Image (cartoon, helix red, strand yellow):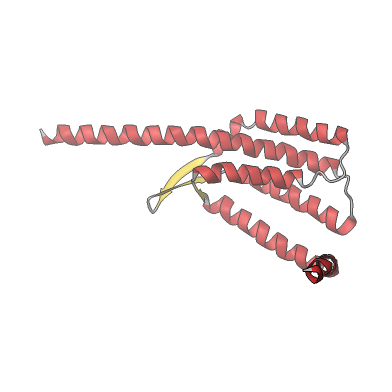
């Protein structure tokens, strides 16, 4: 057991050695996978699930919080204000939400601009941290906070739009049943 605990620091050192030796390759692979997934999800839409509606914004929030490295209290306060402004200004995004059904499953498409804006800001912030060790990226962290606020507000809008979509669908089915009954006579 003692041999395992003694090898853990060396495993960590080995991990960081390879990470920083091949940081361009790791960063390129990460960006390719991360951005590729975001582009596909933004253009094709995502399957609607209640858990996805909660987990996705929480992941954006966690990734954004990870960029707060070395921010002082004033920087964190600025980011919190931008986050609150983002939530408050997310109302107009409801016009960009689209629900559609594919193979009997409900899908939705979010605002492409919000998703791509967050992705670009996050990749830039990550690039600064890895390659230049610029940890005081208040501007990008504030932008990420604002867009994360928009995304969380958009999740609320998706929940509201889903209820309206279900109501309209139910109402149209009832009308169709009534019309079918009237056509019988």
Residue 179 as seen in the image, left or right of residue 6: left
Q: Position of residue 76 (x, y in %)?
A: 82, 35
- Residue 129 or residue 11, whichever sits in front: 11
Q: Residue 91's x, y, as percent?
A: 60, 30
- In the picture, the quarter occupied by the N terminus is bottom right
Residue that appears at 60% across and 31% down: 92
Viewer-closest of 138 and 100: 138
* Left or right of 171 in this view: 48: right
Q: Quadrant of residue 24?
A: bottom right
Q: Is residue 29 above or below residue 177?
A: below
Residue 113 place in picture, x, y as percent: 64, 44
Whether 171 is drawn above or below 46: the answer is above
Q: Residue furthest front?
A: 1
Q: Which residue extends farthest left?
A: 185
Where residue 44 appears, as percent x and y from the top left, is 52, 53
Of the pair 105 and 66, the residue shown nearer to us? 66
Quick check: can you spot residue 49? Answer: yes
Who is closer to the viewer here, 153 or 42? 153
Marker count (numbered): 0
In which quadrant is the C terminus drawn? top left
Q: Is residue 65 left or right of residue 47?
A: right
Q: Is residue 38 above or below residue 32?
A: above
Residue 109 seen in this snapshot: no
Residue shown at 64% from the left, 59% from the top: 36
């Amino acid at each position: 057991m003692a041999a395992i605990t003694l090898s853990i620091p060396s495993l960590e050192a080995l991990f960081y050695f390879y990470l920083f030796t091949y940081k361009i390759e790791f960063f390129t692979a990460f960006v390719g996978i991360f951005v590729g997934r975001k582009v596909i999800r933004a253009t094709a839409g995502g399957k609607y699930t209640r858990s996805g509606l909660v987990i996705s914004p929480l992941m954006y929030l966690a990734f954004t919080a990870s960029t707060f490295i070395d921010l002082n209290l004033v920087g964190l306060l600025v980011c919190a204000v931008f986050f609150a402004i983002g939530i408050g200004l997310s109302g107009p995004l409801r016009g960009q939400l689209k629900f559609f059904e594919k193979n009997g499953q409900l899908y939705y498409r979010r605002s492409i601009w919000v998703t791509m804006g967050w992705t670009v800001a996050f990749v830039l912030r990550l690039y600064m941290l890895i390659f230049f060790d610029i940890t005081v990226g208040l501007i990008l962290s504030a932008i990420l906070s604002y867009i994360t606020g928009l995304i969380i507000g958009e999740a609320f809008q998706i929940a509201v739009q889903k209820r309206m979509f279900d109501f309209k669908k139910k109402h149209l089915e009832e009308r169709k049943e009534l019309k079918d009954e009237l056509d019988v006579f």
